[in-house]
Image: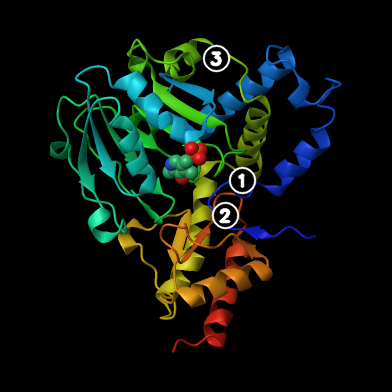
Amino acid sequence: MQRVYNFSAGPSMLPLSVLERAARELVNYGEAGMSVMEMSHRSPEYEAILFGARDSLQRILQIPDNYKILFLQGGASTQFAAVCYNLLNGSGKADYVVTGQFSKKAMQEAQKYGDIRVAASSEDRNNTYIPALSAKDFRPDADYVHICLNNTIYGTRYHTIPDTGGIPLVADVSSCILSEPLDIARFGVVYAGAQKNVGPAGLTIVIVRDDLLGKARKDTPAMLNWQLMAENDSMYNTPPCYAIYMAGLVFEWLEKEVGGLEAMASLNQQKAAVLYDYLDGQNYYLAPAEKPYRSLMNVTFKTGDEELDKQFAKQAAAAGFKNIKGHRSVGGMRASIYNAMPREGVEKLVRFMAQFADAHPKA
Ligand SMILES: *Cc1c(COP(=O)(O)O)cnc(C)c1O
């Protein structure tokens, strides 16, 4: 069986060279005489893996020294609550921008913990855009403002980071982390599930500014307490050892093979342009995301006919383009073209799309 082009929204493709290296090192890592999965997380070998991954991420994203990098568990969804435990402890107010399902889930989770206001929403146009925002949209005494930087399901993204007038900005960056440079200093906290651009599911990255630590509510579960995790170098308990190792290999790939985030961004822009240029030059497929807000990572399109959409996903899968069906809540198609998707995969997909359009004229 050949490897396919996997357009899944997550878990998604990993670089082949990373998988091959992990395979070579699976049974016996270096001189350890054992697999990374079998290692004590307190061993010098494993500490080198974890700290190496952390330092590599700091270099790639140019994370300022006054931020802590945490490797946690539970996915981005666990952070929906962790954000509240750690930050919603001043006025007890937080403002959320709802631009899709994940930002809505984050907001709904937060409602359990404090006075939560929806500062802006794109639900009026089915989340096909990002609302314009300025500092006056937020309550000045809010403990934080929460956004989702790339909307995985709807295929939209922020192109400018909103001005919150000094209120700490918290961003879910699960589906865009490491796709291009990001000015971390504009954020109080960013967090991401690993399974889109980083590595295996379960591992969760939190990058938090120092001054936001130490504000956690008294009833914060230890496992959700960022300060405790930072003090323990993400090893308060057994960390997701193997997933961190895999993430470290992906970071090394980004640094050494891709050449860093500028190079990654340029590749990603080229890939996205192949799809969007095609979509803009034809009238068989509809592209629901409004042009100024189009995602670099998740490209949504549909035929406008549910039966044809079904046919498309089925025939695409048979042709080696897997997991291209849109999210169950919105239908249509979605090509997730994360970092590890080669340009060739996108070019072949576009050829397939054109052939499908020719072979299935609409009534
Ligand atoms: C995938 C995704 C999530 C959910 O991540 P889990 O790790 O499954 O909890 C949350 N937010 C965004 C933006 C995502 O893309």
Q: Which residue is mark 1?
A: 258
Instruction: Choose top left, top right, bottom left or bottom right for residue 256.
Output: top right
* Residue drawn 51% across the image and 27% down it: 58
Considering only vertical position in the picture, is 320 above or below 107? below
Q: Position of residue 97 (x, y in %)?
A: 26, 42
Q: Which residue is mark 2?
A: 8
Q: Which residue is mark 3?
A: 233
Asked if one can make out residue 337 in the rendered structure from this viewpoint, the answer is yes
Question: At numbered mark 1, what does the secondary structure look like: helix, strand or loop?
Answer: helix
Q: Is residue 174 left or right of residue 127?
A: right
Callout 2 environment at 10 Å: few (<14), some (14 to 19), or many (20+)?
A: many
Considering only vertical position in the picture, is 7 above or below 355? above
Q: Is residue 206 left or right of residue 345?
A: left
Q: Disc 3 residue type?
A: Asp
Q: How many marks?
A: 3
Asked if one can make out residue 174 in the rendered structure from this viewpoint, the answer is no
Quarter of the image with the C terminus in it: bottom left
Callout 1 environment at 10 Å: few (<14), some (14 to 19), or many (20+)?
A: some
* Residue drawn 63% across the image and 17% down it: 238
